[in-house]
Image (cartoon, grey):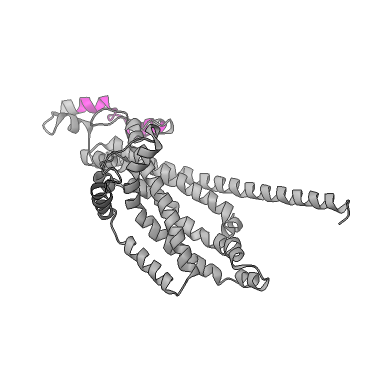
Amino acid sequence: MTTTQAPAATGAGRRAAAARTRHTLGRILATLARSTGIFVPVFLVATFVTFALRSLSGLSPARIQLGEDATPEAIARVEAQWGLDRPFLVQYGHWFEGVLHGQLGTSWTNGADISTLIGLGLGVSLSVATFALVIGVVVGFALGTVAALRRTTWVDRTVTGLVTLISVMPAFVVGIVLVAVFAVGLGLFPSAGYVPAAQGAGPWLAHITLPAIALSFDVIADVARQLRTSLIAAYRENYVTGALVRGLSPRRIFFRHVLRNGLGPALATLGLKFPALVGASVVTEWIFGLQGFGRFANDSAQAGDVPAVQGVLVVSIVLVVLFNLLVNLVLARVTPASQRGV
């Protein structure tokens, strides 16, 4: 190559790299715009329905504070203090304005700020759910990949059987076994309680490891099954045959073609997993003595604390939307199929 050709080739490479960067940025912005367009109407409808539950429930703070023997005058006085004597749409507008500012109202049972109460429990549940998701993705990815690479062999059958077994094991049963073996029997982990990460990474991890493992089984099973199926399907595509004909190594074929095309469905299954882990951890939180988001939701529902339940539903909606947005961004960046769909 001559000296005049080298700068030209370098310039062409830079222009190609810049074009790829612009294309990737465009996909990300398009994904954000599409997700925002979906989020806004969904959030409006969901919050309206959530607030309407207060009227449909027939519950009142007066009944909780004064008891069932309260006089109609006393009930009317307490409801006026809470603004429940105003028209429904006026109440909803005031509540929705507070939601937009991060204010979810006041608890009927103890008068505490609901945003503060949820924040305390959400930190615990997010720690456990995030660690459970990491465990589930790493272990599920490994099992699904091994099963796909050794498909139709005894390794594939063993992994499939193991995944089927753990998928039917309830989290509370796994939690009890983990406490009995690793906390009580071996003394390797604390059996209950929670330590914030600000007080040290070691104690924090020690307290969330067992509940995270108990919650991760469902994620492991879903990721492993979906990834195995997707990878096997990807190996049957024409582009893999073409790569073999061109003489590419099996390693390069797997990472360059098969994995990128097979990741999409496995990642998509995570869209609802993380919020579900946060919300469905109430039993696990009872076993491990954690005052988390799920336990707060359960206690609020049993106490008839409608504003607290509304706050839980709003936070759950936001978690679902945000995590699905994150998954869509990853899909738009990683998988070729989703890139073509943007």
Which residue is at a point 60% across and 70% down the rendered structure image? 240
**Does 88 appear in magenta?**
yes
Q: Nearer the viewer, residue 301 or 46?
A: 301
Q: Is residue 35 rendered to the left or right of residue 212?
A: right
**Where does the image place residue 188, in percent across and percent down from the top left?**
30, 46
Location of residue 248 by image quarter? bottom right
Depicted 9 relative to depicted 202: above or below? below
Nearest the viewer among 318 and 82 is 318
Question: Which quarter of the picture shows residue 315?
Answer: top left
Above or below, 236 relative to 309: below
Q: Residue furthest left?
A: 69
* Left or right side of 187 for 246: right
Position in image of residue 19 (x %, y %)? 71, 50
Quadrant in which the N terminus appears: bottom right
Residue 194 sits in quarter: top left
128 versus 75 height, above or below: below
Residue 157 in sight from this viewpoint: yes
Magenta region, residue range: 76-97
